[in-house]
Image (cartoon, rainbow, N blue to C red):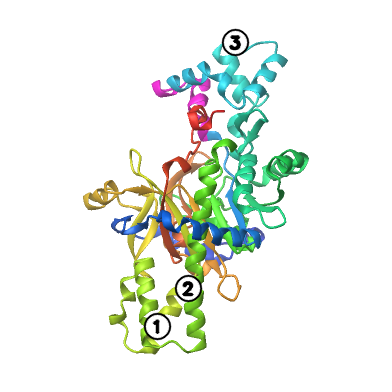
Amino acid sequence: MELSPADRDQLVRHGLDHGEVERQLHLLRHPPPRLRLLRPCTPGDGVVELEEGRHRELLARHAAAAAAGRLRKLVPASGAASRMFRALQAVRNGDPTAADREAWARVRRQLDKLPFYPELAACLRARGVSAAAGDAVLLDALLGEDGLDLAHRPKGLLPFHRSDGGVLTACEEHLVEGAAYLRDAGGRCRLHFTVAPQHRDAFRRLVECDPNRLRQRCEAVFEVGFSTQSPATDTVAITPEGELFRRDDGRLLLRPGGHGSLLRNLQALGGDVVYLKNVDNVLPAPRQGLVAYWQKLLAGHLLALEERIAAILRQLDGGGPGEAELDDALRFVAATFGARDADPSRHRGAAAKSAYLRRRLHRPLRVCGMVRVRGEPGGGPFWVEDEELGASPQIVELAQIDLRDPQQRRIVAAATHFNPVALVCALRDPLGEAYDLQRFVDRRAVFISRKSAYGRPLHALEHPGLWNGAMARWNSVFVDVPAATFAPVKTVLDLLRPEHQP
């Protein structure tokens, strides 16, 4: 038996079922084929452009749901800022590229414009030096363990913006942004951050130690929760030869299963309508108006679709719809979700039509903002052939595509939009019962990558991505949103872009 009694004991204590581990091993040894793209989602063919004449109605729907306390926001915030400071780390370690040296030169010239400059200045004063000190001194103050240690902080706790009111971290900016579209009739705003276990207390202290500043500024009461990725979502790894990868002490190496593991956190949140947004995509408070406006529109569109779906399902449960009503519902499914198999001519009789509509509509719903491609296309909305849904619009990452295939490369190159991770999700059925989100995962949509540990190579497995395979069998609608709503901070240089400056 490949798993020894000691292995099984380790897995039980970790919360992993040995049957799940065997499934992971099969996927690692027999990787599933890459996704086959049919075509990009484009305006009028998978990407909806919300007509301005509908905005008032959608805003009203959002306002009613917000007042009733139906809205929450989930922000994955467990990632460290190491990638943000990779260029600076390379300069500090003495092995920079020309691009790394140029990045550091730009940072050095504009140090006083960075949001963590007040903290840096205090650190330098304590060391008896100034910002005119040499490169080694400045880099040690920025990145050293006895300095600001910026690269090892979680992104959510990193100073992101400066204003007359002081410095705000990314986490705090998400609170301010959320107050504009989450506030219920009692002034409460509910947000949830998924964080790394070692940083949970630091996040909690940030929120709990200074609540009045943001509460008064936003005229809101923040109800903030935190959770961590469950160890039961960790995955095993294999050697290049296909054997279980073990640590130097002989125990199994168990690795975090990627952001798709957060599907459990989303389920446990118990939310009704939940926004999902990356921690590094947040603007300074004075520039958040356009973002809030479109977040409201996305929710309003979702709520309108949810209401129509609920009406159809109630009709079906009541047993009353005739052929004409069923055909109208089928045309709605075809037009809204691009479902070719929803054509009324493909279903004979009321029973078959009713069964199809129940199967197709009784599932979670999401509306996703999509931004026009700027420069090189990345992960985004594409039409994909799915075993369960047929041809359906999906969010696809480049890692899921065989880019050696010329046809697939042409489809990617023709993309008009990419995914900024601006989702709003309806997680309950018409009776208010929470969907079992695990039922709608494409379990073969895993990521397998080459990594190393203990100085040895390995093949690692990540669960289907949270907004990729984990939501593959949801009903999905993609909406064109302005590029100005998307301002991610991937490197420290992004904090110097005009949109992130006071």
Measure the C-alpha gap from mark 3 to mark 2: 64 Å
Which quadrant of the view contains residue 27? Answer: bottom left
- Going 22% across and 49% down the picture, which residue do you hit? 406
- Most foreground residue, 164 or 201: 164
Q: Residue at x 44, y 66 (%)?
A: 473
Depth check, mark 2 against mark 1: the one in front is 1
**C-alpha span from label 2 to label 1:** 13 Å
Identify the residue at horizontal 52%, vertical 41% (top origin): 281
Asked whether the viewer can see residue 28, the reply is: no
Residue 120 at x, y percent in the picture:
64, 21
Q: Which quadrant of the figure contains the C terminus? A: top right
User: Which segment is the magenta one?
Assistant: 83-100
Q: Mark 2 or mark 3, which is nearer the start of the sequence?
A: 3
Q: Residue extending furthest left?
A: 406
Q: Which mark is residue 285?
A: none
- Determine crowd level at label 2: few under 14, some 14-19, many 20+ residues with C-alpha closer than 10 A: many
